[in-house]
Image (spheres, rainbow, N blue to C red):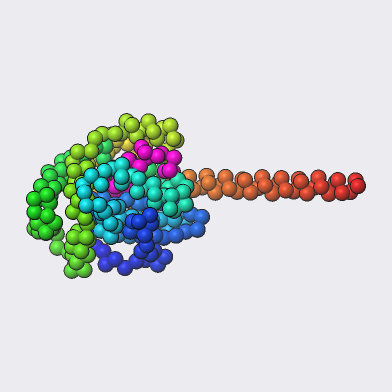
Amino acid sequence: MRNCACDLPAGIRRTEVAGLAALRAEVPAGPVVVLLAGFAASKEDWLPVLPALVAAGFDVTALDQRGQYESPGPDDVEGYALTALAGDVHRVAAALGGGPVHLVGHSFGGLVARAAVLAEPTAVRTLTLLSSGPAGIVGRRRAALRTVARVLRQDGQPAVWATLQAVARPRPDHTDAFLRRRFFAHHRAGLVAVSDHLLSAPDQVDELAAVARLAGLPVLVAHGDGDDGWPATVQADMARRLAAHYEVIPAARHDPAADSPQALADLLIRFWQPDHQAKAEAQTEAQAEAETRAHAEGHAQAQVSGAA
């Protein structure tokens, strides 16, 4: 996140869910949303969109995944397998009430969200892959990540931070202080594991498409119009293979939550809203049926009493 003083908007609090650090905005009876951040990122990256999602009636949780920022993580790289990260998502969903959740994964978070759906599709109400891809990252970011991964293994986080600062754009002091604190709070084993996943993740789009089709799971693929992660053509093709909704977010690069938060929030709400409306309509219809049934039973009982 490029600009974070980390003051929380009204109604959003820091907490812990299933052993993971989280930002929570609880909306009673609201559809549950779980947000997953990307490589070397954190729950704070979602702060720009949280107020709009809450105002629309959604119960939102943004997570630090294991080893990210304020969440603990194991010391061994094997402890960050995608299956383990997906298991964390399901534990969080269960802790939030056990019902299916709207799941959003940004960049590497998209690979985790995909793994969560493949493991247990019925736990997910909708899936959004934001600035993510069908397999390991490609292009310019792949080359940069290979350098980061090599330096991280050889010399650790201080050397990586120094390398990143050499090419970073100027930013406010409070932002720089937060980014530095966050980067060094990440577990080194987690950073190593995630960089490996981003470089070597296999293409599982066809498998995901089959699972989503059988589960009737709506999928959204979206990215900024200037995304320099996975190329737009790659993400568009992934959407085609998934038979997914596909949207390009204007005036955004790889992180639409930072670049175009209102456009991203509006897009997510539009994607989720039909499901929200259908649920509300079903509840209204069930209530009406119950009232009609109660009225009929009362009328029948009155007739019996009158006949007696």
Residue 24 at least partly seen: yes
Q: Is 163 placed left or right of 188 in the picture?
A: left
Residue 302 at x, y = what percent?
A: 83, 49
Q: Quadrant of residue 207?
A: top left
Q: Is residue 204 left or right of residue 100?
A: left
Q: Residue at x 81, y 47 (%)?
A: 301
What percent of the width, then of the height, locates residue 43? 31, 57
Instruction: Report the number of numbered marks.
Output: 0
Query: Between 260 and 278, which is closer to the camera in this rendering?
Result: 278
| Pick the front one: 72 or 184 | 72
Q: What residue do we see at 22% from left, 60% from top?
A: 185
Q: Residue furthest right?
A: 308
108 in the magenta segment: yes
Q: Position of residue 245 (x, y in %)?
A: 37, 39
> Is 34 covered by the magenta stretch?
no
> Magenta residues: mostly which secondary structure?
helix
Say which residue appears at 47% left-offset and 52% top-offset: 97
Magenta-tinted stretch: 104-125
Residue lying furthest front in this view?
75
Residue at image point 38% right, 43% down: 127
Quadrant (top left/top right/bottom left/bottom right) for the N terminus = bottom left
- What percent of the width, then of the height, locates residue 171? 17, 64
- Rendered position, 109 above or below 51: above
Residue 50 shows in the view: no
Q: Is residue 226 above or below residue 55?
A: above
On screen, residue 62 above or below 200 = below
Quarter-wise, where is residue 293 in the image?
A: top right
